[in-house]
Image (cartoon, rainbow, N blue to C red):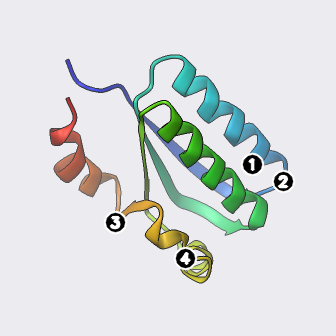
């Protein structure tokens, strides 16, 4: 049986109240059996520090439950924020969902 994978597609401005809702959503998913989360950032138009903080908290929560978290489809502004904060070295970042499906999903057990 494979790992339970959830894909979240973020859109618009990611920060503030959206970041709080996102953290709660990740916690709920992990509590209900999700093992792997792929966050597709392609629809984000802007991410602020609270959005970045929400991603870091999500990663911490997923790892605490022995899960895995991946990011994909990173827009330039978000990539710059990840690079400037060295978070690009902390998160597992993929080009897009197709790369996840071809390189990661087949390895999940």
The foreground one among 98 and 107 is 107
| Label drawn at residue 16 | 2
Between marks 3 and 1, how big is the CA–CA gap?
A: 23 Å
Badge 4 is on which residue? 86
Who comes first in sequence, dot 2 or dot 4? Answer: 2
- At which x and y percent is residue 86? 54, 76
Between marks 1 and 2, how big is the CA–CA gap?
A: 5 Å
Q: Quadrant of the C terminus?
A: top left
- At which x and y percent is residue 26? 60, 34
- At which x and y percent is residue 1? 19, 17
Which mark lies nearer to you, 2 or 4? 4
Q: Tell me: 58 left or right of 88.
A: right
Pointers 1 and 2 in contact (C-beta within 8 Å):
yes
Local SS, label 3:
loop
Figure quadrant of residue 96 = bottom left
Pointers 1 and 4 in contact (C-beta within 8 Å):
no
Badge 1 is on which residue? 19
């Amino acid at each position: 049986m494979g790992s339970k994978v959830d894909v979240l597609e973020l859109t618009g401005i990611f920060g503030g109240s959206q970041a709080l809702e996102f953290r709660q959503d990740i916690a709920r998913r992990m509590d209900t059996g999700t093992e792997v989360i792929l966050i597709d950032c392609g629809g984000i138009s802007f991410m602020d520090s609270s959005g970045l903080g929400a991603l870091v908290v999500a990663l911490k929560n997923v790892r605490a439950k022995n899960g895995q978290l991946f990011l994909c489809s990173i827009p330039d502004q978000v990539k710059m924020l990840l690079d400037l904060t060295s978070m690009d070295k902390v998160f597992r970042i993929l080009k897009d969902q197709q790369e996840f499906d071809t390189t990661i999903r087949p390895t999940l057990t």
